[in-house]
Image (tube, rainbow, N blue to C red):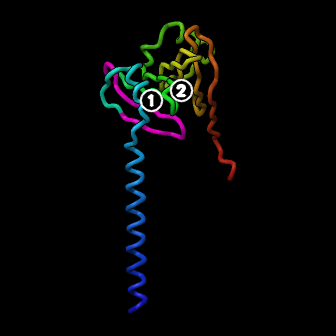
Amino acid sequence: MALNQKNITMKKTIVVLFSGLLALIACAQNANPPEAVSKAFSDKFGTVKGLKWDQEDDEWEAEFKMNGTEMSASFDQSGTWLETETEIKEKDLPENIMNAVNAQFEGWEIEEAEKIETPDFKGYELAIEQDENEKEILVSEDGNITIKKEEREDEEDEDE
């Protein structure tokens, strides 16, 4: 009988610990940024719809809609603006950007496009794909291209 009592106590302890962990996770997802971050966001973007904050390390990211467009903006702990990303459709990319991408990556398809603005860069981030190859590229407003990330999916596994 004592063994069953220990099992029940252990199970209750596990349930309590698990419940506490879930509560901590839920609180972290609904985190509110420091006042300096909130003020910097309001000063830059005003009032927006669907504002959701997320924290990763020392950076705060706000996801929101402005004029019906999905956007995100990042700030450091002190409220310094770091980056704004705006989702766009391929058809909305400027002609000079499309020309630059097509000249350097003929036959590649644009899978995703975002307009990017940081204190040091204004342009576009594109996810492009051809066959099993994927790249993320940055294209400045004047059409200069930088490869940000490159992935190649091999046709055969190395384990075989």
* Residue drawn 43% across the image and 88% down it: 3
Q: Position of residue 53 (x, y in %)?
A: 40, 36
Q: Up-down: is 124 above or below 12?
A: above
Residue located beneath label 2 in the image:
127
Q: Up-down: is 76 above or below 55?
A: above
* Residue drawn 37% across the image and 55% down it: 23
Q: Which is more toward the observer, 111 or 55?
A: 55
Q: Position of residue 61 (x, y in %)?
A: 46, 32
Q: Up-down: is 154 above or below 70?
A: below
Residue located beneath label 1 in the image:
36
The magenta segment is 52-68
Q: Position of residue 67 (x, y in %)?
A: 31, 18
Spatial CA distance of label 1 from label 2 is 33 Å
* Residue drawn 65% across the image and 44% down it: 156
Q: Position of residue 15 (x, y in %)?
A: 38, 68
**Disc 1 or 2, which lies upstream in sequence?**
1
* Residue drawn 43% across the image and 35% down it: 34
Q: Residues within 10 Å of mark 1 (few under 14, many from 20)?
A: some
On the rendered image, what quadrant is the N terminus found in? Answer: bottom left
